[in-house]
Amino acid sequence: MTEQHIPAPRTGSHDAVLRIVADVLKVPHVAAADSFYDFGGTSLQAMRICARIGKELGVRVSPAVLFDSDTLADVISATEA
């Protein structure tokens, strides 16, 4: 029997974070498995993303979360902690 990866259920913040990241990075779409660095994210963009997350979701996230996270799924998890 092979092991199958089952993604975690999506939350309300899931779609919002991905939308915010795509908007700030000026790309049509990002996925939870993508990395902030895959799109050439900068420190200024990280600050903008965190400010928008705070404004739209009412959650404070440090830009360090974007820098230290392997994927955007980690950033989404930080908004739910």
Image: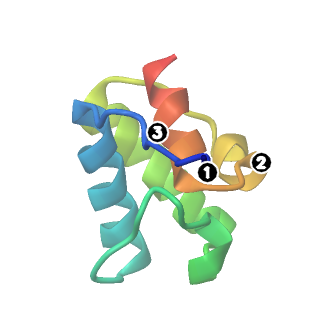
Q: Contact, CB < 8 Å: mark 3 with mark 1?
A: no
The mark found on residue 64 in the picture is none
Q: Is residue 69 above or below residue 38?
A: above
Picture residue at 51% right of the left edge, 31% below the top: 77
Q: Is residue 68 left or right of residue 80?
A: right
Q: Depth check: 14 or 8 in front?
A: 8
Q: What residue would you read off at disc 1?
A: 2
Pointer 2 local density, CA inside 10 Å: few below 14, some 14–19, many at least 20: few
Rendered view: 80 above or below 21? above
Q: Position of residue 57 (x, y in %)?
A: 28, 30
- The one nearer the camera, 7 or 18, is 7
Whole-number angstrom distance, CA of label 1 to CA of label 2: 31 Å
Residue drawn 46% across the image and 28% down it: 79
Q: Identify the secondary structure beneath mark 3.
A: helix
Which three-letter amino acid code belongs to the residue tagged 3? Ile
Residue 74 locus on image (x, y percent)? 59, 41
Q: Earlier in the sequence, mark 3 or mark 2?
A: 2
Q: Residue furthest right?
A: 68
The extreme top residue here reads 81
- Residue of label 2: 68
**Label 3 CA crowd tier, 10 Å (few <14, some 14–19, many 20+):** many
**Earlier along the polypeptide chain: callout 1 or callout 2?**
1
Element class at badge 2: helix
Q: Secondary structure at mark 1?
A: loop
Location of mark 3 (residue): 76
Q: Amino acid at mark 1?
A: Thr
Q: Quadrant of residue 58?
A: top left
Residue sitting at x 52%, y 16%: 81
Measuring from the top left, give residue 80's x and y in whole percent.
Answer: 44, 22
Question: Along the polypeptide, which appears first: circle 3 or circle 1?
Answer: 1
